[in-house]
Every structure is written in structure tokens, then in C-alpha cells.
Image: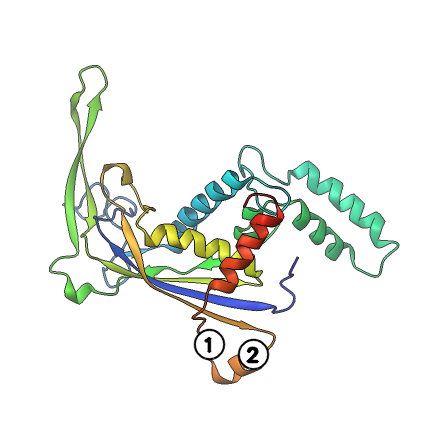
Amino acid sequence: MKPFSVIENRIWISATLEMQTALAVGSRLSIEPTGTDMPVIKDTNGRPFIPGSSLKGVFRFHTERLLRTIDRKPDLWACDPFGDPCVRPADKDSLMSQAERQAKHESQSVDAIFAKMVFQHSCAACRLFGSPWFASRIAFKDAYLKNHEDLPVLYQIRDGVGIDRDLGAARSGIKYDFETVVPGAQFAIEIVGENLEDWEIGLLLTVLQLWSDGGIAIGGKSTRGPGWGTLREIALRRVDRTNLLDYLRQRSAPPVSDWETFRNAFSAKLQEVGHA
């Protein structure tokens, strides 16, 4: 366990998400009299962006799928955070009682012992992305449009209909429209990781590889076309104890060009749990 009380390391992953199809990341209903039923979320300049919450949700979903495929406790597995969480409220109370008893015989505080116990009982996904008991060690910034000047238009309006399940055809009175960002739009992705082990970085890079291959969709209506894109220009920067002071003085984190250290660490973790 690497606590938040010290800076063991920090990573920045940047990339460009280039949409191969349209993108539908919706906002609330339009307040314009002639607005679409489902507008795209926009910044203060009227340009589309992808909320960090949307990026994190998609990324966590695919990381959990990978971890559930591996399914090796205690380090490489993922719980069902809503149906069967790794740490239930009752477990929390029990662990707190154990921590209080243990603290009487150790120099550590109750909170420190309790945090370590909760971390040990948590699945890999909750350790990385957070849970009701732990803050996330990975943050996703809002992704803003990079190439608005290169696009002839920013938005398209598409029609949708409700399908009558008996007739297999459009049902009368259930037509709607929704707004999408045009294909070719490019968004600046930035992910910040705090106190990650090398194998955890390797896990993240593995999921990013899925996205760079075009295997991950984002936004709504992805089963009907929108939402598919690829990651390009993926770059990784990292600081740790050895170069933290240089980073604080120069305000620049050195790039990491060789990712094999992290990939090999993830492969070693797989071998350790018997899944290689």
C-alpha cells in the first residue's frame, strides 16, 4: 500500500482521441426553442468536450472487465461495486474494531491501521479508481476539442425512432433527434496517476492499448455507430522520489520513452498470480 500522505510517484498520461465516427456525449435538454431533444455537452465557448467522469467511467469499466477475466485474488480481481462490493459497510465496522484493538499494541494510529486493512481487502479496481472508503489514485481531466478550426462544422443532428417490438418497425409518435459531434474531432486526453506501482501502470497501458486499437467506445448510442475512436500520440511522464525536487524547481516532468519496465512488471504480476 502506498498512502497519499507522501509522494512516492506521479505519472501523467496524455493522448489525442480522434473520433472515427460521430460522438454523442449528452447534456440536459436544450433551452433553445428550436434546440435538439438531446444536445451535446458544451463548454463556455460553445464547443464540445468530454467530461472527465465519462472518460473515467469507460476506462474503469474496461479495466474491471480485464481484471475479472484474470480473476486472481488478492491483487488482480474486480468486485461488483453495486451488487457485491469488496468492502461492505458491515466489513468496514468489523475492520475498524480490529484496528482499534491492534492500535493498543502498536505505534501506528487507528486510522493508519484501518486504512491498510481496507486497502488489503479492496479489489484492484477499487484500489485504483476509488471506492466509498478510498479516494481514487487516478484522475481524468475534462477533454477539450483540439481541432475546431480544422472542422467545417462541429455538430450534426441525427434522427431516432422507437421500434415497435411486435411489428419490427418504427412506432408512431416516438420520433426524436439528438446532436452529435462530427467524425474527425480530436480531443486532448490527460490522465494523472498518484503513487502507482509499476505493474499498475502496466495495467493502465494495457487498457490504453485497447483504446489505441479502436476497441473502446465512449458516449451514448455506441451500439448504433457513434462513439468509436482511436487514441494517438500517447505519451507518459513520471516523477518519483529521485527526481521530485528537480520537478518542483523546473516544473517539468521528464518523459518516459521506454514502457517495457511497466509492461514487464505487469507480466511478472500475472506470472506471480499464475495467469501467464
The residue located at (61%, 45%) in the rendering is 273
Whether residue 31 sits left or right of residue 116 in the image: it is: left
76 lies above or below 153: above
With respect to residue 49, does 34 lie above or below?
above
Contact check, label 1 and label 2, Cβ < 8 Å = yes
First in sequence: mark 1 vs mark 2 = 2
Q: In the image shown, does 249 or 97 lie closer to the viewer?
A: 249
Report the Cα–Cα distance between label 1 and label 2: 9 Å
Residue 111 figure quarter:
bottom right
Mark 1 Cα shell of 10 Å, populated few (<14), some (14-19), many (≥20): some
Please name the residue that numbered disc 1 is placed on.
254
The x, y position of residue 157, in whole percent, is 15, 45
Residue 209's x, y, as percent? 38, 54
Q: Is residue 245 above or below residue 215?
A: below
Q: Pick the residue in front: 123 or 215.
A: 215
Q: Which residue is mark 2?
A: 243
Percent position of residue 93, x then y:
73, 41
| Residue nearest the observer in this picture, 64 or 70 | 70
User: Looking at numbered disc 1 in the image, what kind of residue is underneath it?
Assistant: Pro
Judged left or right of residue 27, residue 123 is right
Query: Residue at horizontal 60%, vertical 77%?
Result: 242
Residue that sits furthest to the top in the current view: 166
